[in-house]
Each structure stands twice: as structure tokens, then as C-alpha cells.
Image: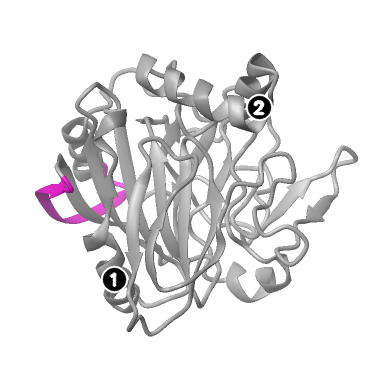
Amino acid sequence: MPLDDRLRNGLRGIADEIDPDVERGFQRATSARPPSPIGRAGRVAAYAAAAGLGIAVIGLGGSSLVDRFGTRPSPSGSAETSSPSANSCRDPELPTCAGPLEPGAQRSRLFIPPIDYIIPLDSPVAWDNPEDRPGTFTLHPAGPDTDAIFFFRDVRVITEECIPQFDETVGNTAADIADWMAGNPGLIATNVVPVTLDGLRGMQLDIAASGSYTTVCPEERHGYPPGLPLLPLFGGAGSGDLTWWIGGDERIRLYLLDMPGGGNVVVGIDAIATAFDALLEVTQPVIDSIIFDPSYY
């Protein structure tokens, strides 16, 4: 679904800063190049056994993918590794992440709406920001690379297929998506409650795979052990052609938030290789500090 007018106007301003040729800059800022999650490929083998959630290019337009371990298919089909030490933002053409974060007040640079947040002075772990795009933003606490706070813009439920499509039978409001998840036999949804996060209202819920979804897709998904069923959850319109999956022992806390002008923002705290309660404890102070810039509503 197309970006709304507010998002588009904001992106034009950002694009002008990225490239003096506004149209070319806007095309780069809004391109469907898949978001590169925060993985470090050297740890793929260690985390593969715990793998659950995958981030890839949705099958709406192609078969290439980028997984959360930082590998991407090369033109020849072999996986290339993205080195965080060489490029902490993962994309030399759009270097907009903050990288390592100092304690104190911080602000996203490209995500719409912009996010102000605080890294606590007494945080027990270091933090970094490996991804900052108009529709995707990531805050990663030190520890397993698979586990972080993810922010996505304008997601839609996708169909349960190996090459999923947007499910047009499900709306894109917080209530629509929460109802779909709560009623999906492939998911265990708990703590489903209304929530307000800095004035944006929606639904909060914790989800895990129930084990009843057994479809194993033939396509190789980098970073996942063969034979692991992965349930498609949602894709992103404003987040680039994103696909989010869940499987194995993964647990996710989701904040599904409605934007006043239409569309949504999703905040996901994803635990694959970390104990879920431990990750919630570390991330909650950052979640509590979030302020969304209302001028972009």
C-alpha cells in the first residue's frame, strides 16, 4: 500500500539531504531495498539452532532476501557477509544509523515519525543502532545479535504461503492485526491488552509459535536450520518489502500502534537467543522513554 502523504512529504525533505537531486534522493530513501537486520554472520551457526524470526524481501516482487544474521545473496547466488566493523549501518548508500550509543537522550534520523528515546545511565548493557530508515529502525542491546527492539512502519498481515502476499481480508489497524494473531491457531497470543505508547493507542500482546504450523518451505532462508516451520506474520509497506516470521522457541512482545492520520507503527521486542523475561527487563526502560514526534502525524 502506498505511503501516505505525510510520510511522502517527510521523505522528500530527507531525500533532499541525502542527495541534491531530489527525485533521485527520494527514490533512494524510499527504495524497497530490504532492511539489513543486525546480525553478525560469524555467529550464524551458534544462533541457527534458536532461529525463529526472519526478515526478508517479501515474495511480492522477488526471491532475494536479507536475513537477521547479516548475509545477503550475491548476484551469483552465494551468500556474502555484511561486516559491522566495515559498515555499521549495513548500507554504504544510506549511512544513517548512529552505531554505538552513549547513555542519555537520542533521536532517530530517518524513521518516520522520528523517535526520541533515552539510553539509561544505569543500563546493564551497551546499546547500538544498526538500522535507521524511513520505515525501519532498530535498537540493539549488547548480547545475541538476533534480539533487539524493532520499529516498523505501515505493516499488513501476510498470507501463510512460502511466497506470501498481503492478506487483503485483514485490515491494518492495531485491533485488526491483534485479532488476527489472537485467532491464529499457529500462534499463542497472551497478555492481549489495549496500550498507549506516548499518545499512540493500540494493542499490546506477547506471541509465540504454537507448533501447529508445520509448513516447511523449500526456499533456503539464510540463518535458519533446515526443516524449521516459519509462520508468516506481516509485511511492511512503509518498511520496504519486509517479511516477518516466527518459529521455534522465539517469543515476541508487540506494540501495534495506530497513527492518527492512518497507517500504523509496530514496535517488536524479539527474543530468540535470550530469555524473554530478561530481554523485557533490559528493554523496558528504553520503551518507556519513547517519544514519537507528533509533527509527523
217 lies above or below 223: above
Q: Nearer the viewer, residue 201 or 55?
A: 201
Residue 280 is labelled as 1
Q: Residue drawn 45% across and 29% down?
A: 238
Q: CA distance from mark 1 to mark 2?
A: 34 Å
76 lies above or below 251: above
Q: Residue drawn 82% across and 53% down?
A: 80
Q: Nearer the viewer, residue 47 or 10?
A: 10
Q: Quadrant of residue 33?
A: top right
Q: Give the number of callouts.
A: 2
Q: Quadrant of residue 211?
A: bottom left
On the question of residue 229 being in view, the answer is: yes
| Prevailing secondary structure class for the magenta stretch in the rendered image | strand
156 lies above or below 183: above
On the question of residue 61 being in view, the answer is: no
Magenta region = 184-198
Residue position for label 2: 28
Q: Position of residue 209 (x, y in %)?
A: 35, 56
Q: Residue drawn 62% across and 51% down?
A: 67
Q: Is 132 on the left-hand or right-hand side of 23? A: left
Is residue 190 one of those drawn in magenta?
yes
Q: Nearer the viewer, residue 93 or 161?
A: 93
